[in-house]
Amino acid sequence: MGYELRNEELNEMLAQLKKEYLIYAPKYFKGGGRFSDTDSVRYGEVSTADEIVFDKKAEYSFKEVLLPISQTLFYFTEDEVKEADAPKKGAIVFLRSCDLHGVKRLDEMYLNNGPSDHYYKRLRENVIFVLMGCEKSFDSCFCVDMGTNISDNYDMSIDRCENGYQLDCKSPKFEEALKKYAVREKKVTSAAVTETKTRVNIPANLSYQIANASLWREYDSRCINCGRCNFVCPTCTCFTMQDIFYTDNGRAGERRRVWASCMVDGYTDVAGGGNYRSKNGDRMRFKVLHKVLDYKERNGYHMCVGCGRCDDICPEYISFSNCINKLENGMKEVLANE
Ligand code: SF4
Ligand code: SF4
């Protein structure tokens, strides 16, 4: 069922929901931009609809709600281990269609890839997703080519309209609240883009032979292995473990898992001083092929959702979408050299 709410009533509804949930949405962080005196748009807790940024893309994704950057798993002493408490409140996340498709990838990795991940599952079970309609695409988006521009597996959707906001609701538990605060009921279809300025072409004959193409060597010197492209990505899921000791004797402390990046030094270090991908171009190759080749072979759809954030964030102006578009010529090169 769809509803129209004025700003004031939506704020009242959010205030009501805040008693039970933490509400996360893209919002401005004043002075938080990468250049001096600039703001950034990132995910943060919001209390009112006015704080939600609808007309800009969040530099980072919603991912840290489900996968905290640093998450304590348990505390230990010599004698016992105590699991870290789960958050007391659930979470409501406002996100766009590409990111909602990203949730599917995270679920695949943490819930269906062998035994489910306990810490992910206990957070995930209490998260509500509100789809933010996309009236237009941003410069670096390529969601249409990745098939992620439309989503219908949301709990609620929200779009701006002349008198405030229009929401569609698929979750019975919010119907009552919406009925209470709505000025009227109406049919609502959330906005979705059907074309993007950035386009990508993943060649149909893409195979692992592409690993021998010369295109990867460009990134040996251009990439500075900062890992930003991984950290902004809604579908990157890697983490590493850290034990933090509270005492000198190492007998009390906590274990945390923290985000890791396949582009950063140390990721492929192994015992004996080995390192599987020491060249930055090889790391780029691994990342790109994971996003558009091997994940699909296993799961039937690409890992990349085309959000374009990695293009936006790279300090070396390395474009992931351009790299995808080089794969066709790369395949021609390797096949000709066979
Ligand atoms: S953001 Fe750019 S420079 Fe940094 S690791 Fe990724 S591709 Fe390399
Ligand atoms: S690889 Fe880049 S474009 Fe694809 S989902 Fe990750 S950040 Fe978005």
Image (tube, rainbow, N blue to C red):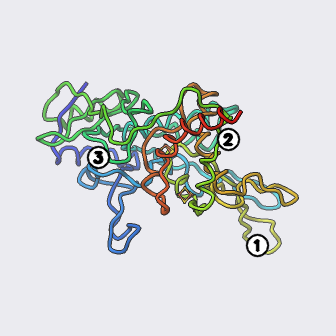
Residue 71's x, y, as percent? 60, 55
295 shown above or below 237: above
Residue beneath the point at 68% across and 54% down: 240
* Nearer to us: label 3 or label 2: 2
Q: Residues within 10 Å of mark 3 (few under 14, many from 20)?
A: many
Q: Earlier in the sequence, mark 1 or mark 3?
A: 3
What is the number of the mark on residue 128? Answer: none
- Label 1 near ligand 1 (CB < 8 Å): no
Which residue type does callout 2 highlight?
Answer: Ala
- Which element carries disc 3, helix, strand or loop? helix
For the question of whether residue 217 can be seen, the reply is yes
Q: Earlier in the sequence, mark 2 or mark 1?
A: 2
For the question of whether residue 106 can be seen, the reply is no
| Residue underneath mark 2 | 211
Q: In this rendering, would 218 be left or right of 46?
A: right
Where on the picture, by quarter, is residue 253?
A: bottom right
Residue 155's x, y, as percent? 37, 32
Residue 34's x, y, as percent? 41, 67
Which quadrant holds the C terminus?
top right
* Nearer to us: label 2 or label 1: 2
Q: In this rendering, would 79 be left or right of 119?
A: right
Residue beneath the point at 60% across and 35% down: 331
What is the number of the mark on residue 247? Answer: 1
Q: Earlier in the sequence, mark 3 or mark 2?
A: 3
Residues at marks 2 and 1, CA–CA distance in whole angstroms = 47 Å
**Circles 3 and 2 in contact, beta carbons < 8 Å:** no
What is the number of the mark on residue 14? Answer: 3
Where on the picture, by quarter, is residue 114?
A: top right
Residue 165's x, y, as percent? 19, 40
